[in-house]
Image (cartoon, coloured by chain):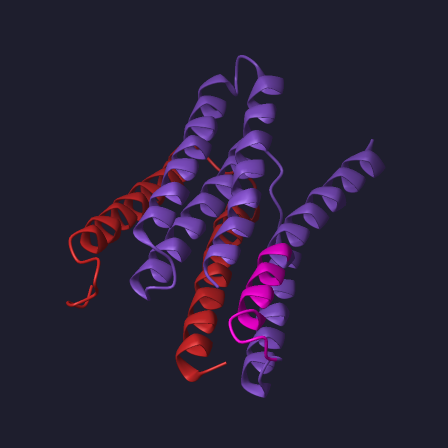
Chain colours: A red, B purple
Amino acid sequence: MDSNNLALALQITHDLLQAAMQTMQKIGAAHAAGRNLSDDELAEFVSADDVAKKNLELAIAARDNDPAGTSPL
Amino acid sequence: MRDAVLSNYQRIRHVVAERFLYRLAVMLRWLESPFGSTLTFASSIGIVVALAVLSACTSLTSPQTFNEKAAVALSSVTALRNTTTTLLTARKITAADAQNVQNQLNTAREAIDIARSVATSDPKAASDKLSAALAIVTALQTYVATRGT
């Protein structure tokens, strides 16, 4: 495994863990306040997914316009 | 009653922990596959640290209500979109692969949105929709790991 693949794998692992921790922290904060996750708080997850969806759309479009990889994304 | 609630709480916590560990297992397989090599010392340390953080994280809390389960499902979809974006940007997968993942995740998201809309009127249907969405995400995790090699 070269350093690039290792760095990429660790970045993905970091991103997954960070996402999991943020989710659990939000749920835990609600529980600590003596309540469950509200609709407004759930809406934040919806918004975050909308952003991720748009980012992936843009990345796909960028690759479609540069299939040979001549310009950095 | 209290025992039943505690038992259910522990079961949900176990499922959540299992799902996150599965993601890590998928990552491990992806780590090992490109060159057929064993994990390096550095990556092993990273994974051990990640597991420790994960263990601490999942012991903090677990989803109990529909909103909380929906939040976990949504964050799973979001995390997979971000992983796909990372792999595409790093040129580990093609645009066609990424588009395929995006389409499937859109389907999962639609299932979650439907579940949210019927959560009050039909909790059973909402739970089934969430399960369907999570099944899609689980299958996609394997797909992305396979295509990322």
Q: Report which quarter residue A72 is drawn in.
A: bottom left
Q: Single out the residue that lies furthest toward the bottom.
A: B41
| Residue B126 appears in the rendering | yes
x%, y% of residue B30? 54, 65
Q: Is residue B149 left or right of residue B56?
A: left
B106 above or below B101?
A: above
Q: Nearer the viewer, residue B56 or B105?
A: B105
Q: Which segment did they paint magenta?
A: B22-37
- Taking the magenta stretch, the answer to whether it contains residue B29 is yes
Q: How many marks?
A: 0
- Taking the magenta stretch, the answer to whether it contains residue A17 is no
Q: Report which quarter residue A42 is drawn in.
A: top left
Q: Dominant secondary structure of the magenta stretch? A: helix
Q: Single out the residue that lies furthest toward the top.
A: B121
| Residue A42 appears in the rendering | no
B120 above or below B16?
A: above
x%, y% of residue A46? 37, 38
Q: Tell me the residue at 51%/62% (across/down).
A: A17
Q: Report which quarter residue B131 is drawn in.
A: top right
* The N terminus of chain B: image quadrant: top right
Q: Tell me the residue at 69%/48% (across/down).
A: B13
Q: Tell me the residue at 51%/35% (across/down).
A: B70
x%, y% of residue B95? 30, 51
